[in-house]
Image (tube, rainbow, N blue to C red):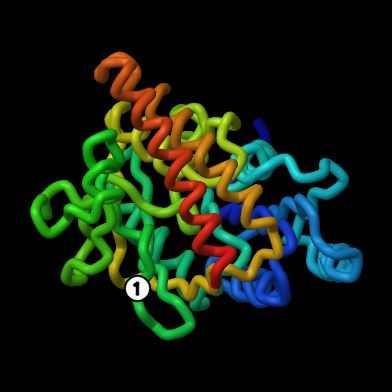
Amino acid sequence: MTPVNQSLTSVVIVSYHTGPVLFEAIASVLAQTAPVELLLIDNGNPPEASDKLRTLALQDARLHLFNGQGNVGFSKGCNMGAHAAQGETLLFLNPDSVLPPDTISKLNEHGARLKRPYMIGARLVGADGKDQRGCRRAALTPMTACVEALNLGVLFPQMRFNRHHEPLPTTLMQIPVISGAFMFLPREDFWNMGGFDEHYFIHVDDLDLCLRFRRKGGEIWFAPDIKATHFAGTSKANRAVLERHKARGFMHYFHKNFGSQYPKPFLWLLDAAIWVRMGVRMGLGALR
């Protein structure tokens, strides 16, 4: 592991055919009022975009570009960046997220008041300014998954998975799960938890990390005063491939984390439901 710079935050971005918003995200990170370095994992971008990234890296020594490894997935890409990071704290940021210039400063202020190990998430809003799903979530269990999949949240509100519709808190709030699109935590705490599980190629990795983090005594916080604009859906990635990776990720998550708590037939039934869900989503996507 590289030496730690206690005044520095290492921002890790994994990019795959992100589109023009990637360069807005990069500019917003490098414009932070607090010291930062940016570790950008180029898992695959058009040649003109990759050429522009190389030019930017030559122009600003704070931008460290990793390419040539092919598409190794989100989890492995994040771990690659974290291994090379020199900052005491890490911010895992989606490549289609744009930050206000005081974001890192506010995160450091919050972190200085929290007990370690801690992790902080933020509001993720779309271009329309509305809060997106994912930034405030309950723990995903087989039961909460069933409630969410069957739209039973009205009958069982305490078991709802997504909580972005709830009133926005006024101060830091402890929460079970935040989004992998925006995760801030001390680098040492990240590695003490084992980093991202590289069995997840993309999706579900954040749910797994949050669950492990809490099971090992960590606290996860949502900061309502920090807001990132998340332009979701800009990637040119193949939808069918994404859905297959998501389905495999959910299966791995439930068997890994709940295999000893639920009967195997129940988990097999859940596996079948996951594949049916994937088929329905792909079918609806084809009709749009």
The reply, left or right, for residue 31 in relation to residue 260 is right
Percent coordinates x, y for residue 156 in the rendering: 10, 50
Q: In this view, does 260 lie to the left or right of 88?
A: left
Q: Residue furthest left?
A: 155
Q: How many marks?
A: 1
Task: Quadrant for residue 167, please give it.
Answer: bottom left
Q: In which quarter of the image is residue 52?
A: bottom right
Judged from the image, the secondary structure of the residue bearing numbered disc 1 is loop
Task: Using the rendered image of the protein, determine whether residue 107 is visible from the camera's viewpoint.
Answer: yes
Q: Depth check: 146 or 63 in front?
A: 146
Quarter of the image with the C terminus in it: bottom right
Mark 1 lies on residue: 131
Q: Which residue is drawn at 49% across and 47% down?
A: 278
Q: Position of residue 179 (x, y in %)?
A: 42, 54
Residue at image point 46% right, 69% down: 103
Query: Residue 106: where, in percent of width, then height?
Result: 39, 67
Query: Is 87 drawn above or below residue 249 in the view shown?
Result: below
Q: In which quarter of the image is the N terminus?
A: top right
Where residue 12 appears, as percent x and y from the top left, is 62, 53
Q: Which residue is drawn at 79% across and 67% down?
A: 60
Residue 251 sits above or below residue 129 on the image:
above
Kindly tell me whether residue 115 is visible in this rendering.
no
Within 10 angstroms of label 1, few (less than 14), some, or many (20 or more) residues?
many
Image point (36%, 68%), residue name: 123
Residue type at the position of mark 1: Asp
